[in-house]
Amino acid sequence: MKKGSQNFPTLMTERLTLRQLSINDSVEILLLRSDEEINKFLDRKPSKTLIDALNFIKIILENDETLYWAITKTGDEKLIGTICLFDFVNDVKKCEIGYELRTEYQGQGIMIEATRKVIQYAIDTLGIKSIDASTHKDNQSSTNLLQKLNFKNLESIEAENPNLILFRLTQKI
Ligand SMILES: CC(C)(COP(=O)(O)OP(=O)(O)OC[C@H]1O[C@@H](n2cnc3c(N)ncnc32)[C@H](O)[C@@H]1OP(=O)(O)O)[C@@H](O)C(=O)NCCC(=O)NCCS
């Protein structure tokens, strides 16, 4: 679909700059991916060392099928969270969204600001018609966020993992 470091889409919001991930983000990626509170509802292998974090970053940078942004506060390069679009299905213009924010930056509306921008970019620039998200049934913060963004619970579709709730945002025509 995209990308290469020269034309990676940096996005700006009122408070945030969403930029391409960099190998210089390994300390912050390790902080995020080793945090038990953040990993609580995420089905993933935690990063344990800087090498794990660096390997993860390299995989992301080599993957042309995923748009993965580092969330930073404008004026400060430091990564405070991540947001990504993945699993693009080009013929039906669909993709998935995922996000995570360092715990000390939660509760400030940062993720809703970032997700709104990324969704706008997906619809307006990539021509995406629907965005899916799956979240653990006990992940209230994520569910709240998705509902504020107008994602609808796909109650009729059973998730492969019964602990997950599937949500979908469909572009209004
Ligand atoms: C999911 C996650 C990103 C939500 O983070 P968050 O900070 O709660 O999300 P938001 O940006 O929507 O912020 C909402 C909170 O900020 C508050 N807030 C403060 N200032 C605000 C502002 N200017 N605008 C909007 N909300 C604001 C809201 O009142 C709300 O607080 P509440 O949770 O007490 O009701 C976070 O919990 C996280 O990273 N979890 C771990 C990873 C994860 O589970 N990811 C999802 C995988 S599916």
Image (spheres, helix red, strand yellow):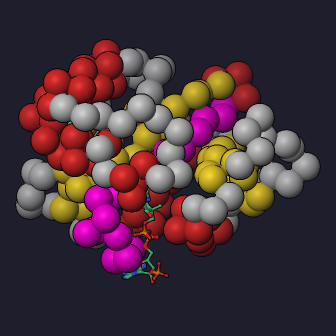
- Which residue extends farthest right? 156
Indicate yes or no whether the magenta region holds residue 139.
Answer: no
Q: Which residues are magenta?
A: 93-109
Residue 146 position, x and y percent, is 60, 62
- Name the image quarter holding residue 90: top right
In the displayed structure, does residue 119 sit left or right of residue 59?
right
Residue 74, horizontal then vertical, whole percent: 16, 61
Q: Is residue 129 visible?
A: yes
In front of the other: 10 or 140: 140
Q: Residue at x 22, y 48 (%)?
A: 31
In the image, residue 74 sits, relative to residue 108, either above or below, namely: above
| Quadrant location, ligand no. 1 | bottom left
Quadrant in which residue 147 is drawn = bottom right
Is residue 97 magenta-colored? yes
Q: How many marks?
A: 0
Residue at (46, 21) in percent of width and height: 65
Give the quarter of the image for residue 5.
top left
Query: Farthest residue in the bottom direction?
Result: 108
At 29% from the left edge and 44% from the top edge, which residue is drawn? Answer: 34
Is residue 17 in view from this perspective? no
The structure residue drawn at horizontal position 71% and vertical position 49%, both measured from the top left corner, is: 163
Closer-to-camera residue (94/153):
153
Can you give x and y, in whole percent of width and height, for residue 91 in the image?
70, 22
Q: Nearer the viewer, residue 52 or 107?
A: 52
In the picture, the quarter occupied by the C terminus is bottom right
Establish if 107 lies above or below 121: below
Left/right of residue 55 with respect to residue 167 in the rendered view? left
